[in-house]
Each structure stands twice: as C-alpha cells, then as structure tokens.
Amino acid sequence: MDESAGAGDVGGWVVAEPRPIASGPLRPVRRPVPRPGPGEVAVRVEACGVCRTDLHLAEGDLRPHRAGTVPGHEIVGRVVAAGEGADRFAPGDRVGGAWLRGTCGVCRYCRAGRENLCPSSVYTGWDADGGFTELTLLPEEFAYPLPGGADPAELAPLLCAGIIGFRALRRAALPAGGRLGLYGFGASAHLAAQVALAEGATVHVLTRSAAARRLALDLGASSARGAYDAPPEPLDSAILFAPVGDLVPVALAALDRGGTLAVAGIHLSDIPALNYQHHLFQERNLRSVTSNTRADGRDFLATAERIGIHPTVTRYPLAAADRALADLAADRVNGAAVLIPPSAPTSDVS
C-alpha cells in the first residue's frame, strides 16, 4: 500500500451551496486523504472531465444528495491502495471512474441487465465524492481498466460523455447508413458523432455555437447549422444533447416517418406542447436515456479503441475548476473540458 493514501491531506472542490455558477457554488477545500473501505481502491487522479451534469449539480438543477460533495465523474487515475477484499487491480494500474457507481445487483432491473434503472443506484460525484480532487475512492467493481500509455486528459471524456453518447446513439435506433441529427455539440455529441461516422452514418449537427459547428465539419459531419434550423434532409434518428426542452418539437419535426429522437441529458427544461399530427404521428418515437450500464461502458471503450476516437479537449488546472464550469455554462468550451491535478502531467494546461 502506498503511504500517500493514508496520510496528509489533498486538495479539491466541493459544491458548497447550489446556485448560479456566476455566484460561486464551488468552494476549494483541503481534506484528509481518504482511506479505501472494503471493495474500494484509492486512486491518484491524473485527469477528470467536466460534465454538464456537474454544472446541473452546482447550480441546483439536480438536488444534492449530500452536503459538501466533491463533483466529477470522468475520472482517470492510478491505483495507490486497496481496501479489504479489493483485488481486481494492482498498485500502479490505470483505472477509470464513471457516473454509475453502484447498484443493488438483485432487483428485477439488475437481473435483466438493465442496472441503469436500478432504484438503488448511486452515482459518483452525487452520492459519493468524485474526481475534482487529487485523490479519490472508487468501488473496484464499477471501475474500468484503462490503457496505461494513453493521454489521461483524452481518456477522461470517454467515461461519461462518451459512454452516455454511445448509449444515446443506440437508443436512437439509427439504421445502417442512416441519417443522424445531433442537437447540441459538446463533449458527448462530438464523441457520438465519431462513432456514428465510423459506422457509416450521415451526420447533421444543429447547435448554436459557431465553434462547435466548425468542429463538427472538421470531424466529418455533412452539415452544421443553427440549433433551430431544419437539417438539409429528413432524419432517421436524432439525439438531443442540449438541455433545452424547446428543441424537442424541433427535432421531432425533423424526423422522417418511423424516426426516433433520444433525449440524452439528465436534466431538461420544460417541453412545450406537442402537436400529435406534426410531431408524433407516422410512428415517430421519443425516448429518454437514463445513465448507463457497465456493459455500455465496456462496449464503448472497446469501440473507442477500435475506431480510434479522438476527443477534443480543453485542459484546465484543478485550481481552475470553477472557471471550467463557468466556461461550460457559457458555451466557451470546444469539445470537452478536463481538469488536471497538480501532481499529474501538466503539459498544455491552460
């Protein structure tokens, strides 16, 4: 066991009081180094992605499950210690921590392979401290083995943005060679787009950010227009990544007959009234996306390695976590924001 996992303290951030990001809901803290309990590993954080869910938690769109929680659930790091009974990873192994942190394992959803719907599910950075810190704890059964030689900042967005985007893509029921619309083009969408393109889809991006539209075209999208614009052709499938309920009828209206819209976010503003004939008739489908299963994570990480997904990342030092969230709220992040703790490699840290 590395003694660094049992002595001293570590720096990080907590959600002190949920409120608008401009008023400073995050507070920097120093806390004793956490000790891993049974089935847990202590992980020295090398990088942690900044997810829109972290912003929802900080601003109170998601009700906090505990006071003073360290946010962050796109965690890449090295195992430094293990608790009782934790033998899946060795010290020095690189692992990833994602949003889904635990399930009961015995309910009808878990037994059916739908653990993302488990009523007893718990989440990293919501029910337990996450990765906006130098060292954190992960339950080893919900951690993912990661390649040791890759850039940790480019691995981090895969662990939520990538996994959730992958599940949303599957929920959108995109047919082979189909036409896919992506509404919003941040961390999750720019990874889902790479999977869809590799699988032969035609991708149309609808987003308010001019920089995101340029990125979409650079990645191979066939078109990139404003969020409320019509795509150049009817869509077989669409995914709504922007947390904007007003876009639901817009995206439904863009679907061809039999098309499917998947809503990928954990939070969405109110959806306006739908017109049955215009938005849902002719067997258009509206689906939500809830968390992920560990099978989703394994499948996506294998797919990402196979097709060579390349995240676009903006790096921030851990000390600038509040600035990273503010930039995310203002659409100033192109691709994914990633925090780099001071003990991690610091190349290209802004």
Image: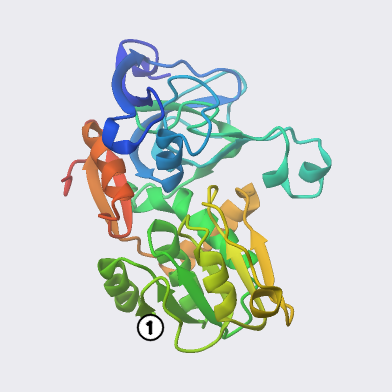
Q: Report x, y in % for residue 21.
A: 32, 37
Out of 349 and 179, give the one closest to the viewer. Answer: 179
Q: Residue, x 70% and y 79% (percent of image)? A: 277
Question: Where 252 sits versus 158, above or below?
Answer: below
Question: Where 314 sits versus 95, above or below?
Answer: below
Which residue appears farthest toward the bottom when viewing the image? 233
Which residue appears farthest toward the right when viewing the image? 108
Instruction: Give the crowd class for mark 1: few <14, some 14-19, many >=20 residues within 10 Å.
Output: some
Q: Is residue 71 left or right of residue 166?
A: left
Q: Is residue 233 left or right of residue 78?
A: right
Residue 199 in sight here? no
Question: Where 24 sits versus 308, above or below?
Answer: above
Q: Report x, y in % for residue 185.
A: 39, 65
Q: How many marks?
A: 1
Q: Report x, y in % for residue 198.
A: 47, 77
Question: Where 164 sits versus 232, above or below?
Answer: above
Q: Residue, x 34% and y 73% (percent of image)? A: 216
Q: How is the image coloured?
A: rainbow
Q: Residue, x 36% and y 44% (percent of image)? A: 50
Out of 212 and 61, give the one closest to the viewer. Answer: 61
Amino acid under label 1?
Answer: Ser
Q: Which residue is mark 1?
A: 223
Q: Report x, y in % for residue 192.
A: 48, 66
Question: Which of the image's four quarters has the N terminus?
Answer: top left
Quadrant of the image occupied by residue 11: top left
Q: Residue, x 48% and y 49% (percent of image)? A: 160
Element assignment for label 1: strand
Out of 97 and 189, give the one closest to the viewer. Answer: 189
Residue 323 in sight here? yes
